[in-house]
Image: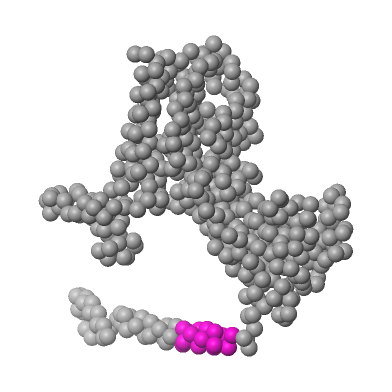
Amino acid sequence: IPYEDVQLSATQLIQCAANVLTAVNGPLQQRTTILDLDYSRATTFPADYDTDLESAWSNPNLFADGNDFSWETIERNRNIYYQKQLANQIINQMNEIIALLSSSLNIHLNIGQQSIIDTSQVFMSLESKSIESLSNKLSQQMVNVQIQLPENLNLNLSNNSKISIRTMVTPLAPFGNTTTQSNINLSTCVSFSILGENENEISVQTDLNRPIEIIIPRDSNLIIPSMILQNVTSMNSTPHNQLFNFQYINITSTLPISVHLEIQPLNSSLAYLFIYKFDQVPQLNSSIKQIDGSQLFCPSGLTNESIYHYFLDNQQTFGHQSLIFGLRELNSTEMSDVCSNSSITYLPITNERFNFTSNYQLRIYTSGCYYIDNNNQWKSEGLIVGPLTNHNQTQCFSTHLTSFAGGFVVLPEPVNWSYVFAHADFNRNKTIYLTVICVSLMYIILTIYARYKDKKDLEKLGVTPLPDNHQSDEYVYEIIVFTG
């Protein structure tokens, strides 16, 4: 078969398969809506509902949300249940099609040649190389995707071996067979494989000292929410003793995430001191230093958009539930001392309450690097989010090759703890304090009463032995009496 015919057939087949894969994952990723007719067909009772005891329809626990067994919940989750089954089936069929097309195209490729399928639905590249070409760092760039291998990658193959490098990009990452929240519905899916002469995938393992770098783009139509104004100057007139303006964000996640903070001062000539601590309120003064990290924000570090950036990767946030950070505006003396001399490493510490002369805007988002395993589960082992991650892409450092996607979520406005502390006095919150006190007293009284009743019940359960009126009797009887 001529190569041109194979290329044309492969393009149409992979394009059709990619369309089906995107369509079946669209509703699961909440990127497309479900048609009423499809929803009706998915929730219609099967003909063997009352005879097939092993049918999923016979087990409402599969479709309930905890204790919510309402009909609407069961219908919605039943549709998702079967949609996930269909999506996983199509993923497996898609992998089979890719393997067959790779084998057919690879027959016509000599060492150094490349076959590219580039459509709006899918990008696929298959390149034939010698093992010697991997001795130098290999960089693949296509459709905003970049994959960079480390130097001296060892594949345990002879120097004259022929390999094939397959790269594939689909516009929407598959939902997978996972119950964990990965937030990959705005990510493309990037697959990178190295094939041997027998068309089998070669396992590639490296370490985080020499990682594989992958740049994963997001949906080009993504609209980023605007930054949130922080009216910190209004707190200058409020009585408080806070040294920093503290804010709290919840970073609880089943899969590791990175945290990205963007601070845009309305006055770009100001400098700030930024501190943070996981799971606790950070403290920094002349006598206490309880922080997990800090950063000086000087005007020289502003981006072209006049934004200060701070980044915490997924290794730093792993195992933590919350992040509390504080920001303080530096006065002119502190700014002159620490911002004019880049060699200064100490922090400007003060015991005076904060005083902001200008407001700033804030935006916080999280990202993540994930791969899909053989069971269609999204995992994060061996992946680190890189500092080049932004609104448009996720930079991942990996120790292995497979299919990757990047998570992305813009967080809501964080809780302003400085405002909470400044307005927590009794006179401002009489109703709240009295309600809490009354409820607490009622709880204590009920607890004491319940304990008293429990002790009475235990007394009633006791067994009292009675002396025998005839010493010669040999029979023993046991009678237990309980009065409620």
For the point 56% across and 28% down, the residue is: 140
For the point 23% across and 53% down, the residue is: 37
- Left or right of residue 408: residue 54: left
- Left or right of residue 116: residue 337: right
> What range of the chain is rendered magenta?
429-445
Q: Nearer the viewer, residue 159 or 442?
A: 159
Q: Nearer the viewer, residue 51 or 124?
A: 124
Give the number of marks.
0
Q: Is residue 114 visible?
A: yes
Our reading of the magenta stretch's main secondary structure is: helix
- Left or right of residue 469: residue 206: right
Say if the magenta span includes residue 46.
no
Q: Position of residue 137 (x, y in %)?
A: 63, 25
Q: Position of residue 452 (x, y in %)?
A: 41, 86
Say if the magenta span includes residue 437.
yes
Whether residue 415 is situated above or below residue 8 in the rendered picture: below
For the point 54% across and 11% down, the residue is: 160
Q: Quadrant of the C terminus?
A: bottom left
Q: Position of residue 404 (x, y in %)?
A: 49, 38
For the point 71% across and 50% down, the residue is: 304
Whether residue 240 is situated above or below residue 386 in the rendered picture: below
